[in-house]
Image: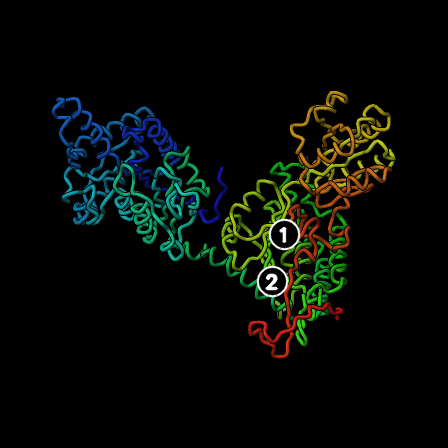
Amino acid sequence: MAGADPNRSFMKDVKRIIIKVGTAVITRNDGRLALGRIGALCEQVKDLNAQGYEVIMVTSGAVGVGRQRLRYRKLVNSSFADLQKPQMELDGKACAAVGQSGLMALYDMLFTQLDVSSSQLLVTDSDFDNSNFRERLRETVESLLELRVIPIFNENDAISTRKAPYEDSSGIFWDNDSLAGLLALELKADLLVLLSDVDGLYSGPPSEPSSKLIHTYIKEKHYHEITFGDKSRVGRGGMTAKVQAAVWASTGGVPVVITSGCASQSLVKVLRGEKIGTLFHKNASLWEPSKDTSVREMAVAARDCSRRLQNLSSEERKKMLLDVADALEANEDLIRSENEADLAAAHEAGYESALVSRLTLKPGKIASLAKSVRTLANMEDPINEILKRTEVADGLVLEKTSCPLGVLLIIFESRPDALVQIASLAIRSGNGLLLKGGKEAMRSNAILHKVITNAIPDNVGEKLIGLITTRDEIADLLKHDDVIDLVIPRGSNKLVAQIKSSTKIPVLGHADGVCHVYIDKSADMDMAKRIVMDAKIDYPAACNAMETLLVHKDLMKTPELNDILVALKTAGVNLYCGPVAHKVLGYPKADSLHLEYSSMACTVEIVDDVQSAIDHIHRYGSAHTDCVVTTDDKVAETFLRQVDSAAVLYNASTRFSDGARFGLGAEVGISTGRIHARGPVGVEGLLTTRWLLRGKGQVVNGDKDVEYTHKSLPLQ
């Protein structure tokens, strides 16, 4: 179910609603009436009527229904010779006259079955020239609504004064969409719903993959951006007519929603304030400014602030981090209070224990985070470090130096402590930062962001670190490859794949953490037990936790292996098996051998030797972190040399694969890619290089007067 849209809170005050039903909603692709769809729509109207809403309908479809009937009659009464002649287009007025009675009879029959009364009101645009007519019309509608009767309006195309009412767009109104907009204003409706055969207004033709649904129409933003597709397949308006009517009515003070009349319970969802369809509102530009502009400005501001940060001295940047650490400790009570509010909401929503664990800021966590920030502050300054000096030619010196990447967009899971680590790394590396955390940690992230940015001095600016609050903003940011330099998504395989397919910006990250521990036949089994238990239960929700235990075949019936498995079970770990281990150990089969549980569960599988373990890891692993436990140096070196993962460990728990534990201070994530950074990404992974060439007026001039030396020089 679509979530509630805060911009639609006014729905709770709606009483009078006008519903316009398009021809494409009430007819099928072959032109015949969509009886099931019309019936479902009438049931929704009946329910709204029973709840006390004043419902007025405007329906299209008479011309379409009439055309279908007349074509059938003409076919039945045609001779073979008639069928050989060119077929003339049927007169639209005649189609309207024939179809109107059948259409209204259908509504009457359906509403009667639902114990609701309906009425027919046929109007033409010339009727509205008469002020007396307008007054009588309002009185009639008020009387019908008091009697709980559903007024059903339709333009009387059969007697319209226009020559071609189904094509002509002149007059006070020119189709049933504009009629609905006119009636919304005349009858002082609280809401107008225009039902179409698509979900709402898209940025382009809905059939194009690049088109996106616009949830709130903002004229200043969307008027020149939208590309309309073809007009309605059966009616005369299509989306262009609906948008014109919606803008007209909403400018006059009546909110409008364009949504699908083919979707289940669409009217009910609109009135609940759910974020479906496209909303038109006269105040939209005030309470929902153009996000495309705002998020771009956020990225540009982060870049400007990062350049000011780079211009500070090393001591000034160090002091910024120390101030952040002090601010975290000074605001611990407030941070914990907001975190507890997130936890209460998570428990109420019934989230899984693994997610709640990631969300929790346990006692001592703030002090630990402050300590890690201070550790970063006391590290050697990574910016503007001279990495290499070369004499290119006499008096021409080239320096390779470290510098920030620029602006980072980091999307991270529901771990508020990750926000602190990422923000402190960005400050230390001189990068601008845009953050999007999990919605479950919304309050925790907001207070942490506020505490950190308040500690940033004015000569840098608090916009160095921006906090993204909605998914919609992420989609907009991914378009701006000219102002964002790197995206780091920390989350599911689906999220990473989705980000990669949606942007031209380089993406760094890992999709899964399917980490293995392989126990070789030569292993010290007491050591193996310690490593396995730590790798699985120290923090099972972490991406570096063991998910698969591989065991040499010679160990499968030993007491030592049984002792390890019993210890795991006793600790609360659910054991699953691969195909070979299932036959020997009898635990349930794992759904997949490429599975990240992120909880107290793991897979056990038997392998023939170290090479089989390596092959298994390459086939089912995620190139994150893998460990061998052995006393055989040859086995260890084979494993270390051949396992193609970001981190490969020998006789040590996979939980060591972490930025802080590797001495990086912290990490923005772990990369399993092979371009740029790999493994835990700390400060160094957020830097790139620049070349600085210092000369004395040299010119190339076809290399005639330059004698290249390319001599390495000592670093200064």
Q: How many marks?
A: 2
**In what element is the residue under mark 1?**
helix
Q: Is residue 55 left or right of residue 575?
A: left
How many residues crowd around disc 2 within 10 Å: few (fewer than 14), some, or many (20 or more)?
Answer: many
Indicate which label's residue lies in the foreground, 2 or 1.
Answer: 2
Q: Is residue 589 left or right of residue 482?
A: right
- 308 w.r.t. 631: above or below: below
Residue located 48% across and 48% down the image: 6
> Percent x, y for residue 225?
38, 53
Question: What's the mark number on residue 445?
Answer: 1
**In what element is the residue under mark 2?**
helix
- 542 w.r.t. 85: above or below: below
For disc 2, the marked residue is: 464
Q: Amino acid type of disc 1?
A: Asn
> Percent x, y for residue 285?
41, 56
Q: Quadrant of residue 700?
A: bottom right
Q: Nearer the viewer, residue 149 or 692?
A: 692
Q: Is residue 87 left or right of residue 707?
A: left
Q: Earlier in the sequence, mark 2 or mark 1?
A: 1
Separation of marks 2 and 1 at Cα, in angstroms: 16 Å
Q: Amino acid type of disc 2?
A: Leu
